[in-house]
């Protein structure tokens, strides 16, 4: 069958704020986010100023734009600005922390089977270089309650566990970990926590003061909808002197009045385009201003939409939802129907995912994970999506 038989979904009332390709039904906000027009316009203006007066922009007045962005971010995530630095992505944040650790042979670094591959690689390399060991907690998925996550993690803690790398929201499986409880329990056991919150800001309400992790890194280019290259790293004050950025530059011996040595080291990583960082405050304001209830209404609307979509697809395919709705934000993983399970991998991107895009204009990821390995579809919901997008997806999948 062909896509002519399917009626393209009506765009949501908010979709005009984005410049996503009109031919695409974009159901993958989770991978790289998508930046609204107004924020891209601001970024363009900033870049114009940078190229008009590079030295003014990048050196003399650099902090005049950086610091307000940091202050607004601090308010948004419930942190002190002195404990925060911008980085270009969560991968850089994880690299900075892990590669700054002073490990002894036999030390253990804890992670879970649901962690993100790139960050897992950093953990492996850090452990290899120090003769330390990576210990993987086996979190069940599908799962029935948050307690199963906490129990799986605490079960593998030993006196040698130095640090746990934990996703706040997992990538392929899309589960929100109960990190408040996990951080508390690990801290009591003397284990440092590095929370990979790549998906968290803009998907759920964050309060780092209340969470009190040792380290927390997250993207702002995903659910806050800042331009690509906007992310942050929080380091608890007592650990800041030990953390070096992934890229060492001037800050190690050039202190600036009014900034901490931690900020000096991270604020400049060599010549680059800082316009994404400078847009962070406006992105927080813009997205939080689209609905009368502000950010809480954005979280709720996206959650409700992705839950309705998950119900629709699970009923259509007669599959069990793999976890309770309370463990999800605005992303959800759904097991693909049996007829998709036996197909063999066909390269970097699965053939069915390519067909959905080529034949129906749908951008949505297919993933493989779990023991035994299963195939999953991961859907995202952002303000530019509507229920009709997921009905269209369900109808298109029926035709594959
Ligand atoms: C849990 C998790 N960690 C880290 C990342 C990496 O993000 P980035 O490529 O922006 O560094 C992702 C990206 O999707 C993720 O889902």
Image (cartoon, rainbow, N blue to C red):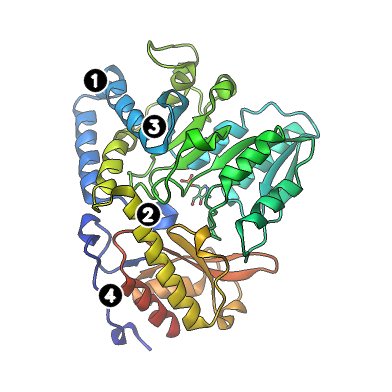
Dot 3 or dot 1, earlier in sequence: 1
Nearest to the observer: residue 170 or residue 300: 300
Q: Are marks 4 and 3 in contact (CB under 8 Å)?
A: no
Frontmost of labels 4 and 1 is 4
Q: Residues within 10 Å of mark 4 (few under 14, many from 20)?
A: some
Q: Nearer the viewer, residue 289 or 136?
A: 289
Secondary element at tag 4: loop
Q: Which circle, 2 or 4, is nearer the viewer?
A: 2
| Residue carrying label 2 | 299
Residue 394: in sight, yes or no? yes
Task: State the CA–CA distance, disc 2 to disc 4.
Answer: 23 Å
Point out the tag, 4 or 3, that comes first from the N-terminus: 4
Q: Position of residue 148 (x, y in %)?
A: 67, 57
**Residue that mark 4 sits on:** 9
Q: Position of residue 17 (x, y in %)?
A: 22, 55
Query: Could you say whether the residue bearing mark 3 is in a helix, strand or loop?
Result: helix
Residue 74's mark?
3
**In whole angstroms, how far apart are the C-alphas of marks 4 and 1?**
47 Å
Q: CA distance from mark 4 to mark 3?
A: 38 Å
Mark 1 nearby-residue class (10 Å; few <14, some 14–19, many ≥20): few
């Amino acid at each position: 069958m062909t896509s002519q038989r399917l009626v393209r979904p009506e765009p949501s009332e908010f979709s005009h704020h984005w410049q996503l390709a009109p031919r695409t039904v974009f159901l993958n906000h989770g991978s790289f986010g998508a930046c609204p027009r107004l924020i891209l316009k601001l970024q363009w203006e900033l870049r114009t100023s940078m190229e008009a007066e590079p030295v003014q922009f990048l050196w003399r007045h650099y902090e005049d734009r950086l610091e307000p962005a940091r202050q607004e971010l601090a308010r948004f995530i419930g942190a002190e600005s002195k404990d925060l630095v911008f980085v270009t992505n969560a991968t850089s944040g994880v690299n900075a922390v892990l590669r700054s650790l002073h490990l002894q042979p036999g030390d253990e670094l804890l992670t879970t089977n649901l962690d993100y591959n790139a960050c897992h690689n950093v953990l492996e390399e850090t452990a290899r270089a120090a003769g330390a060991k990576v210990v993987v907690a086996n979190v069940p998925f599908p799962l029935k309650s948050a307690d199963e996550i906490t129990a799986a993690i605490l079960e593998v803690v030993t006196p040698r566990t130095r640090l746990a790398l934990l996703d706040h929201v997992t990538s392929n499986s899309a589960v929100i970990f109960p990190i408040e409880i996990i951080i508390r329990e690990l801290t009591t056991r003397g284990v440092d926590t590095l929370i990979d919150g790549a998906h968290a800001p803009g998907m759920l309400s964050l309060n780092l003061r209340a969470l009190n992790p040792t380290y927390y890194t997250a993207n702002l280019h995903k659910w806050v909808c800042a331009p690509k290259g906007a992310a942050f790293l929080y380091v608890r004050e007592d650990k800041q002197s030990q953390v070096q950025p992934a890229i060492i530059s001037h800050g190690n011996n050039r202190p600036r009045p009014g900034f901490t040595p931690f900020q000096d080291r991270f604020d400049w990583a060599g010549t680059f385009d800082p316009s994404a960082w400078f847009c962070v405050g406006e992105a927080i304001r813009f997205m939080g201003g689209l609905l009368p209830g502000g950010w809480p209404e954005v979280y709720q609307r996206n959650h409700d939409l992705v839950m309705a979509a998950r119900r629709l697809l699970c009923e259509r395919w007669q599959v069990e939802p793999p976890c309770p709705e309370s463990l999800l934000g605005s992303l959800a993983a759904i097991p693909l129907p049996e007829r998709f399970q036996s197909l063999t991998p066909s390269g970097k991107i699965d053939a069915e995912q390519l067909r959905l895009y080529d034949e129906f204009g749908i951008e949505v990821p297919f993933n493989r994970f779990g023991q035994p390995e299963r195939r999953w579809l991961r859907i995202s919901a952002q303000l530019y999506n509507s229920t009709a997008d997921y009905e269209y997806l369900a109808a298109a999948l029926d035709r594959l």
